[in-house]
Image (cartoon, coloured by chain):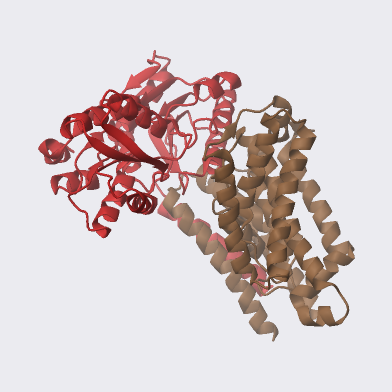
């Protein structure tokens, strides 16, 4: 009997804690539309910025916003569960950054079946998987990752005088975002025969893996003089690996996303360049698109968010602007 | 039988916990207690529940299996590759299940013949199986299957989602094996006192090896459902699933010391986790707080387990 009541109390207390922590942020007030933003994870500042942008837009447009994310970026199944649960909670519209370009398609099918408009943010769906399953999305909001890869590739060709030995740290294999960045980068350096890629391996978007994979690459190819990481988190991991190898300043580090830590690293000379995406604008545009769709207004199928190169010249300036 | 009484009392405690949680969620949100949401929760719980069924065998036998998440990935990609090569669905499923069972048996042999502690043997397998899955697929997901295969996740039987039916069947069979067969009784007695079991003439190594085979098989069954659900098999699927399965088993009252526990508790444990996650999503609770709540529930469930045991002696 005592055991029974103890489990009982534990769970009550835990749930009450959750409900208490949460008061005021989720109650639907007076039938305002509720927009859900489901992101890949919250352990990357990129998504925190996206959340901030979405919150701004929600406040301005007078809608409620629910933000959810899986604990791990690799956990597509959990992201699907979140989407299913939000469908049960009858959210009015769903903005989603897919953890897997193909794997998330069935979840979107379920949102379609529940007539909830879906806006895809940041990472495109796999076109074929989406077409095969016949799923519909209102709009894609994001930067042109291929173009971003090109921008950084062009920069490298110019900065290195057309001579570099490059290692690439890829994202999770099969992710559209990382694949497009690598493709853009490779295409940009194609015309410079002296810029060669000596190693290219996934580090799954993570800092510790960026560190380990690049450390191993440096062991295998001591002549590497440039690393392009498909996101800044991995690039910062590579920066640490370079420091550990005592080669700071001898390897050019290129990243992607222009998160605050990377801007600082560029200002301090530990990194050389990155590509600025504007996740807060993505979050803002996604919520705006959702609200428009709910009002029945026309929404462009492709909403492009600006993108730009960040080097020492503008690293500080851009981060002040935030 | 005081020991038996305590065990069933704990099960009742877990069940009451599930009930209390449900009542609370019902009071907090109108979206929880609807037929479609409850089916949704059962469907979401299926994968963890099935892995946890295998984990329950392992933990009752006094062991642990850390490789289940990686085995989900490996069995999934084996199944997916077979499907893509045009193999008929039953054959492809058999291939996936065979891989899961086979690697599970390898775990068992490393533990019995190799005399490795289960923690080490399955920790090694966690990495080996993950590596095999990545190597085999070159790191890329295998996706896009026949609707006939996807029906395993998407179809409904009398209104009940297929994964829920599959979970029920798995639990009925597992329960029969654990409580009605000689193998099942040996699992308990090995976990209770391995040496005494050996001295009474039981081929302990064989049964212990099979226990890990069962766990691998359960992971592979979960992999079939996961692959059908996502219409894709990822070599990086199932990361940290072992912890969810261990948590469900332990919340369900199966002792990590071995020798006691059962599947009834495990399914309730899995449901508590499923209902918690679902409810926290419905309420729109921040993802960070969700992790805290789930962690607290696991810790307190085990705390109850150990306090009860301390009182018993």
Residue drawn 31% across and 25% down? A190
Say if B107 sits above or below A172 in the image. Answer: below
Coordinates of residue B202 in the picture (x, y in percent): 86, 74
Q: Is A313 above or below relative to B273?
A: above
Q: Is residue A286 above or below residue A295?
A: below
Q: Is residue B125 left or right of residue A41?
A: right
Q: Quadrant of the N terminus of chain B?
A: bottom right
Q: How many marks?
A: 0
**What quarter of the picture does the C terminus of chain B occupy?**
bottom right
- Residue at position x 61%, y 78% from top? B307
Q: Residue furthest top?
A: A298
Q: Quadrant of residue A184?
A: top left
A192 left or right, relative to A36: left
Residues B243 and A56: in front is B243
Q: Nearer the viewer, residue B35 or A281?
A: A281
Q: Is residue B184 left or right of residue B9?
A: right
Residue in the image at 60% along x and 70% along y: B302
Tell me, yes or no, if residue B267 can be seen here: no
Using the image, determine if residue B201 lies above or below residue A240.
Answer: below
Q: Is residue A306 left or right of residue B75?
A: left
Q: Look at chain A in the picture and name its colour.
A: red
Image-quadrant location for residue B9: bottom right
Q: Position of residue A171 (x, y in %)?
A: 41, 40
Query: According to the rendering, which colour does chain B have?
Result: brown
Q: Is residue B223 visible?
A: yes
Q: Position of residue B68 (x, y in %)?
A: 63, 55
Q: Residue at x 35, y 46 (%)?
A: A44
Q: Residue furthest bottom?
A: B313
| Residue A114 rendering spot, x and y as whole percentages | 58, 26
């Amino acid at each position: 009997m005592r055991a029974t009541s103890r489990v009982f109390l534990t769970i009550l207390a835990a749930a009450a804690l959750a409900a208490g922590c949460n008061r005021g942020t989720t109650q639907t007030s007076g039938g305002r539309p509720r927009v859900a933003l489901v992101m890949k994870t919250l352990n990357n500042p990129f998504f925190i910025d996206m959340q901030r942008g979405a919150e701004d837009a929600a406040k301005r447009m007078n809608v409620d916003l629910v933000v959810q994310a899986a604990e791990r970026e690799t956990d597509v199944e959990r992201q699907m569960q979140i989407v299913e649960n939000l469908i049960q909670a009858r959210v009015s519209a769903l903005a989603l950054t897919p953890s897997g370009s193909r794997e998330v398609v069935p979840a979107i099918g379920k949102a379609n079946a529940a007539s909830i408009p879906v806006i895809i943010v940041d990472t495109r769906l796999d076109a074929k998987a989406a077409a095969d399953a016949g799923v519909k999305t209102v709009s894609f909001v994001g930067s042109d990752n291929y173009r971003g890869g090109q921008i950084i590739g062009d920069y490298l060709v110019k900065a290195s005088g057309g001579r570099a030995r490059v290692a690439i740290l890829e994202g999770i294999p099969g992710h559209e975002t990382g694949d497009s960045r690598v493709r853009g980068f490779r295409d940009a350096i194609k015309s410079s025969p002296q810029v060669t890629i000596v190693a290219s391996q996934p580090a799954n978007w993570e800092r510790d893996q960026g560190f380990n994979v690049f450390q191993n690459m440096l062991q295998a190819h001591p002549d590497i003089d440039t690393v392009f990481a498909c996101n800044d988190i991995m690039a910062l991991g590579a920066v640490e690996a370079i420091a550990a190898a005592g080669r700071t300043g001898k390897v050019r580090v290129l990243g992607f996303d222009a998160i605050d830590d990377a801007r600082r690293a560029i200002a301090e000379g530990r990194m050389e360049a990155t590509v600025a995406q504007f996740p807060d604008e993505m979050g803002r545009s996604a919520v705006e698109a959702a609200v428009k769709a709910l009002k029945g207004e026309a929404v462009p199928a492709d909403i492009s968010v600006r993108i730009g190169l960040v080097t020492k010249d503008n690293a500080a300036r851009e981060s002040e602007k935030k | 039988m005081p020991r038996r009484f305590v065990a069933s009392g704990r099960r009742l405690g877990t069940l009451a916990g599930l009930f209390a949680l449900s009542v609370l969620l019902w009071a907090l949100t109108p979206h929880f207690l609807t037929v479609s949401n409850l089916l949704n929760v059962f469907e979401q719980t299926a994968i963890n529940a099935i892995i946890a069924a295998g984990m329950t065998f392992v933990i009752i036998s006094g062991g642990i299996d850390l490789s289940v998440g990686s085995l989900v990935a490996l069995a999934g990609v084996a199944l997916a590759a077979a499907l893509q090569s045009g193999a008929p669905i039953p054959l492809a499923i058999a291939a996936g299940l065979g891989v899961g069972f086979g690697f599970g048996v390898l775990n068992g042999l490393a533990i019995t013949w190799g005399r490795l502690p289960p923690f080490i043997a399955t920790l090694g397998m966690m990495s080996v199986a993950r590596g095999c899955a990545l190597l085999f697929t070159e790191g890329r997901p295998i996706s896009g299957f026949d609707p006939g295969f996807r029906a395993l996740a998407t179809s409904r039987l009398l209104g009940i989602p297929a994964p829920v039916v599959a979970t029920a069947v798995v639990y009925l069979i597992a329960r029969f094996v654990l409580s009605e067969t000689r193998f099942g009784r040996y699992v308990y007695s090995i976990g209770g006192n391995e040496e005494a079991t050996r001295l009474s003439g039981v081929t302990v190594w064989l049964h212990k090896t099979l226990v890990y085979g069962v766990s691998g098989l359960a992971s592979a069954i979960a992999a079939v459902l996961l692959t059908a659900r996502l219409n894709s098999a990822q070599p990086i699927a199932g990361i940290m699933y072992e912890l969810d399965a261990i948590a469900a088993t332990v919340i369900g009252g199966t002792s990590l010391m071995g020798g006691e526990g059962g599947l009834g508790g495990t399914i309730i444990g899995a449901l508590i986790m499923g209902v918690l996650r679902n409810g926290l999503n419905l309420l729109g609770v921040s993802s960070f707080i969700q992790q805290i709540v789930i962690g607290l529930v696991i810790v307190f469930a085990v705390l109850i387990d150990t306090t009860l045991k301390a009182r018993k002696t």
